[in-house]
Each structure stands twice: as C-alpha cells, then as structure tokens.
C-alpha cells in the first residue's frame, strides 16, 4: 500500500488552516500589489487583476507539465496526480460562461478591495442576497421562505456599516463607492458563477472528461485570463508601458503580484478540499468565520480600524449570512418515528 501521509482528520484540519491563511495572505498581497502600482486611482486595477489570473494560468500549466498537484502537501499528504484534461472544443465552449463569471467576480473583487479592503469585505458578505435574486430569476432556484426572511438582516447590516456619525451626533451615509459598487458586482458575478458551475457539471460527459474539480478550476482560470486580457487592453492599455516598466524595476510589485496570484489559486483549491468533505452546517460556519478572520487580519495589516458602525454592521450582516446558511436545517421538520405496538 502506497504511503498516504497524515490521517484524513489531520489533513482536513490543516486544509482549514491553510485555506484561511491563504485567503488572509491573498488579501494582504493583493492590497500591496495595488499600492505598488499607485492605488485605486492609478488606473491599473484591471491590469493587476488580469495578471493575477495570468499567474494562475502559468501555475496550472506547470502542474500539467509535471503531472502533479501539490495542494495536498498542505495537509501533510502525498501530492495527487493531475493529468491534462481530455476536454473537447465543445466542452471548452460550454465552460466559457462559467469562466466569464469567475473572471468577472475576481476582477470586481480586486476593484472592491482596492477601494477599501475592510468595507469591501463587509459588502462581499452580502453575497447571499444577490445569489437569491439571481437563482430565482435566472435559474429557477428560489430560496426558501425562511432564507428570504434572513435577507433584510444582511442588507440592514451592510447599510448600517455604511453610516458615519457626525460631530453633531447625526448619522449620514458615508462609504467608499468603489468598494460598494464593485463589491455588489462581484457578488452578482459570484451568484451567476454558482449557477453556471451547477449547469456545467450537470453534463456528466463534461465532468468526466475534466477528470476532477482540480482540472475544472485550472481551465476556468486559464479561460478567465484570456477573457480579461482584451478588457484590460481596452480599459487600461494606454498605461500598459508604465506598468511593464514598473514591473521590471519594482521588486515589491513583482513579489506581491506573483504571491497574490498563487495564494488565490491555492486557497481556492484548499477550500474545495475542505468543503466537499464537511457537512453543510460546518461549511456555513467555516465560511462565516473566514470572513470575520480576514476582516480582523486586514484591519491589523492596513492599520485601519473598523468604525463602531462598521463593527456593528458587519456583525449584523455576518450573523444574517450564518442564519441564512443554517435556517432551513434549524427549522427542518423532525422526522416522525414509527410507533411500535
């Protein structure tokens, strides 16, 4: 019997740890990469987002070249074999909607976090609201009545986090519009991504030819990179020489761009490993805890403390997300046990 490494229980715990750590470091490296090109007013945010997917694409090609996916090493287990998928041209065409939504969600998230890393995370916590709307309208997958009742809690939390108290004690809306607009756009893209992913995997032939979620994720990042390239050239092409010159000379930009791309790829893979073997309740709690931990970590990294309104608002929103995830299980009718005479 081949040596496997750590027991699955130990590996699962480590996957959780490195999933969280990878997400935290991605946010840190992403912020540093954006700051290295001049921040949100530099006009190079789309370029940074596109180059991050470029790093993901290179990483995927290297895995196929060596035929090894090292992700399980983070769980102290032996790496898995990863061959080039046997996808057809038709499969790739079917994958374009998913890749487009994934690329859109990624780029919009980079814009949102570039606007305000903390408020961007708060807005991102409202993803279930967009998922409910998109699922109902476009995929005929309406949430339950109980889940719908949780949506105002999430919206109210984000709204409260947008308030700022004036010197006279009155409240007014004050927030980073870039973080709000692109955060909600990222949520919409993420909602469509979930729908398109389910639709793609419902085709058993496509799923079989991919040969696993690892290959599907790799192809999605590569196609997403190709999709973002023309958008990058159309919106920021005039600044590309400036970016290339800075990339050649700025070691901070080089490091943070590569590391943000790698962390993005790896933490998403580790999230897949953890969520596919845990129950729905554990997955919901894990995702909620991750959002809190990332916000606390980014507050420490950026030196920007959350306001009282943001603390309360984010707490309400995150509680609403957790309740949304668990409410159907909590209120599920108990099975009646058959009476014995």
Image (cartoon, rainbow, N blue to C red):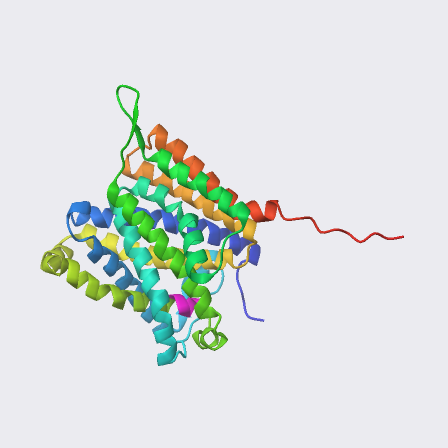
Vertical relation: 69 (above or below) 171: below
Q: Position of residue 268 (x, y in %)?
A: 40, 57
Residue at far right of view: 341
Could you tell me which residue is drawn at 39 percent across and 76 percent down?
A: 91
Q: Is residue 340 left or right of residue 77?
A: right
Q: Which quarter of the figure has residue 303? A: top left
Q: Is residue 15 above or below residue 298?
A: below
Is 318 situated left or right of 220 in this image?
right
Residue at 26% across, 66% down = 227
Name the magenta segment's main secondary structure. helix
**Label total for image:** 0
Using the rendered image of the protein, determine whether residue 95 is visible from the camera's viewpoint.
Answer: yes
Is 309 magenta? The answer is no
Q: x%, y% of residue 260?
A: 29, 54
Q: Image check: 23 left or right of 275? A: left
Q: What's the magenta region?
A: 213-217
Nearest to the observer: residue 68 or residue 108: 108
Q: Position of residue 323 (x, y in %)?
A: 52, 42
- Assess whether residue 216 is covered by the magenta stretch: yes
């Amino acid at each position: 019997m081949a040596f496997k490494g750590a027991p699955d229980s130990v590996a699962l715990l480590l996957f959780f740890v490195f999933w969280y750590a990878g997400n935290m470091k991605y946010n840190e490296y992403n912020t540093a990469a954006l700051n290295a090109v001049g921040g949100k007013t530099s006009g190079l945010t789309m370029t940074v987002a596109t180059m991050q997917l470029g790093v993901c694409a290179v990483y995927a090609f290297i895995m196929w070249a060596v035929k090894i996916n090292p992700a399980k090493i983070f769980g102290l287990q032996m790496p898995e074999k990863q061959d080039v998928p046997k996808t057809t041209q038709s499969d790739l065409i079917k994958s374009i909607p998913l890749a487009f939504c994934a690329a859109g969600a990624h780029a919009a998230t980079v814009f949102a976090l570039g606007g305000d890393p903390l408020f961007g995370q708060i807005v991102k916590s409202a993803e279930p609201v967009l998922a409910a709307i998109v699922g109902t309208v476009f995929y005929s997958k309406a949430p339950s009545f109980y889940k719908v009742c949780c949506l105002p809690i999430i919206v109210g939390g984000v709204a409260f986090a947008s308030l700022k108290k004036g010197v006279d004690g009155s409240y007014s809306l004050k927030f980073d519009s870039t973080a709000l607009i692109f955060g909600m756009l990222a949520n919409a893209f993420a909602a469509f991504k979930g729908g398109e992913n389910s639709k793609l995997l419902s085709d058993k032939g496509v799923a079989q030819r991919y040969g696993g979620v690892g290959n599907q994720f790799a192809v999605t990042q590569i196609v997403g990179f190709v999709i973002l390239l023309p958008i990058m050239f159309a919106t920021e092409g005039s600044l590309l020489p400036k970016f290339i010159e800075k990339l050649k000379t700025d070691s901070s930009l080089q490091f943070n761009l590569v590391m943000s791309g790698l962390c993005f790829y790896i933490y998403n893979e580790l999230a897949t490993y953890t969520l596919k073997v845990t129950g729905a309740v554990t997955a919901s709690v894990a995702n909620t805890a991750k959002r809190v931990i990332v916000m606390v970590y980014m507050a420490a990294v950026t030196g920007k403390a959350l306001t009282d309104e943001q603390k309360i608002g984010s707490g309400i929103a995150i509680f609403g997300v957790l309740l949304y995830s668990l409410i159907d299980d909590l209120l599920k009718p108990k099975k009646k046990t058959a009476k014995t005479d």
